[in-house]
Image (cartoon, rainbow, N blue to C red):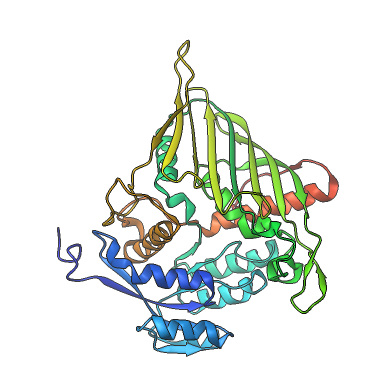
Amino acid sequence: MNSAMSGTSKRIIRFGVIGCGLMGKEFASAAARWLHLQQVDFQPVIVAVCDMNPDATAWFQANVSSVSLVTTDYKELLASPDVEAVYCAVPHNLHAELYADIIAAGKHLLAEKPFGIDAEANDRIQQAIAAHPDVLVRCSSEFPFFPGAMQLVQWVQENRFGRIIEVEAGFWHSSDLDPTKPINWKRRIASNGEYGCMGDLGMHVVHLPLRFGWKPTSVRALLSNVMTERPDGRGGIAPCETWDNAILACEVNTPDQQFPMVLSMKRIAPGHANSWFLRIVGTDFSAEFTTKLPKQVAYLPYEPGGAQAWHVVDAPYKSAYPTLTGAIFEFGFSDSILQMWAAFCDEIAHRDRMLQPFRCATPDEAAMSHRLFSAALESQRTGNAISLVWGDPA
């Protein structure tokens, strides 16, 4: 092992955080826990933070000793020569302007989905990326880094499934089932966009299908606005303008096969707290993983005339990047975030020579999600299945 891998020398990547809410703090926690990773020769250090809320930046000042710049003006952060890369987590209506400015400033960017409030906003971000090809830009999507999901990725890459019969992927949670929960920006079209739950949750759902090349050639959408109003936090009631739940019935055509794929994104799924899942059914092999059962992977191997029996096995703690944790223990959400950040920093440090091959969600994949969600909105408006023709992913 060379000196870098043994820990005596690491490539330090100095980060700024724009948007210091929950996910910004999750990044800070992952950076503080970097010693948990083994055999990596890079490390993020947060040196600058920006948020309009002083309480949010105060948390970073109190808990992240490396922070030296605190500002309410993101352009001041971008002007700092100490900042090499940025994590940006802001409402969807701010994505186009902020992401484009970050990229134009030459800062590597990991940013939140959906990469623009709508397709036009995403186009602006794509143009900035094209104009600055040396800047690495990726989209946040941590759930595929669960060991169970990584196992499904391996099985797809090994062509285990034979002819695919059907695919189902989804991301469900239930916090919005409570009608007394005050309205927030995700329930307003002006800040969240018309996509509603698709923009908020959809990248998690489509990340792996798109990575596998399973691009829908048609979509029929069933969108639901379950809670049409909520408390406004000031003693009144405000309308909820965005879709709570979305079910997208898609047809996938690859060069060698055709199959249905159901994608579901739900803010109101009683009994679920951030349940991400992927189910692939094939003629030779079937498999399923859900974060609701994070230690287990289900699979069904089949030979003609043989038994058809699902097997359920524990998924050991075997992550993309080795860690201190033994294989007998559980993998969780904070672990997946750490792995996602390792993948992003690995790509900054090594580009095409990453220590392992699974990359974070790409801008092209985000652009494809916009095409799909825009078609889903058209399907909801017309009641028809909408065709998609794939060429240039942007």
In the rendered image of this protein, does residue 94 appear above or below residue 265?
below
Q: How many marks?
A: 0
Q: Nearer the viewer, residue 140 or 266?
A: 266
Asked if one can make out residue 379 in the rendered structure from this viewpoint, the answer is: yes
Image coordinates of residue 324 in percent, x first then y, are: 26, 57
Outermost right residue: 382
Foreground residue, 175 or 12?
Answer: 175
Q: Is residue 334 left or right of residue 76?
A: left
User: Which residue is found at the position 38% from the left and 84% from the top?
Assistant: 82
Above or below, 11 relative to 391: below
Q: Please provide percent x and percent y for residue 177.
A: 70, 56
Image quadrant assignment for residue 183: bottom right
The picture places residue 161, in percent across and down from the top left corner, at: 47, 28
- Between 170 and 271, the one nearer to me in the picture: 271
Q: Nearer the viewer, residue 358 or 120?
A: 358
For the view shown, which residue lies furthest in the top direction? 305
Assign the N terminus to one quadrant of the image.
bottom left
Query: Can residue 50 be seen here?
Result: no
Q: Is residue 52 above or below residue 310?
A: below
Q: Residue 299 location in percent, x, y? A: 45, 30
| Location of residue 54 by image quarter | bottom right
Q: Dividing the image into 4 quarters, which one contains the C terminus?
A: bottom right
Q: Residue at x 64, y 44 (%)?
A: 263
Q: Residue at x 47, y 88 (%)?
A: 70
Q: Horizontally, is 352 left or right of 390 in the view? A: left
Is residue 35 shown above or below 278?
below
Image-based side of 104 in relation to 229, left or right: left
